[in-house]
Amino acid sequence: MAARIRLTRHGSKKRPFYRIVAASSGAPRDGRFIEQLGIYDPTKNPAVIRVNLEKLAEWVRRGAQPSDTVARLIKKAGFKKASAGAESDRALSEGSR
């Protein structure tokens, strides 16, 4: 199965925090994962987003697709897909104009 980059929920009732993980697409939300890539704590003001961008870039290079929520979070954290070695994607999009 393909790998996904998604959130797993932890914390107690009404006090959530999330781990950003690489997991198999068939695994349950809070179940087994392959590697932890960062954390997201929405209870802090402002919300805390810590991501290991090197590990994230490696998983994107391997073909892991981030969920919509994780995509927004990593964009806030400063991750750019072009920095993950997607030079060919940029060249293709420029050539199709």
Image: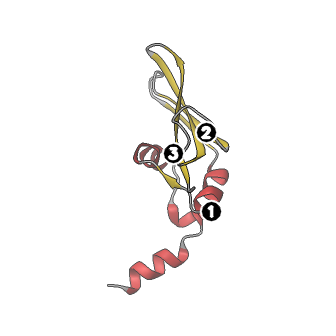
Residue assigned mark 3:
77
Residue assigned mark 1:
62
Pair 3/1: label in front: 1
* Mark 2–mark 1 distance (CA, rounded to whole Å): 18 Å
The correct choice, above or below, for 19 with respect to 12 in the image is below
Amino acid bearing label 2:
Gly
Residue 29 or 16: which is nearer the viewer?
29
Residue 18, horizontal then vertical, whole percent: 53, 30
Instruction: Report whether 81 appears left or right of 94.
Output: right
* Mark 3–mark 2 distance (CA, rounded to whole Å): 11 Å
Amino acid bearing label 1:
Arg
First in sequence, mark 3 or 2: give its number.
Answer: 2
Instruction: Report whether 52 appears left or right of 41.
Output: right
Residue contact between numbered discs 3 and 2, judged by CB atoms under 8 Å: yes
Amino acid bearing label 3:
Ala
Residue depicted at 59% across the width and 41% down the height = 21
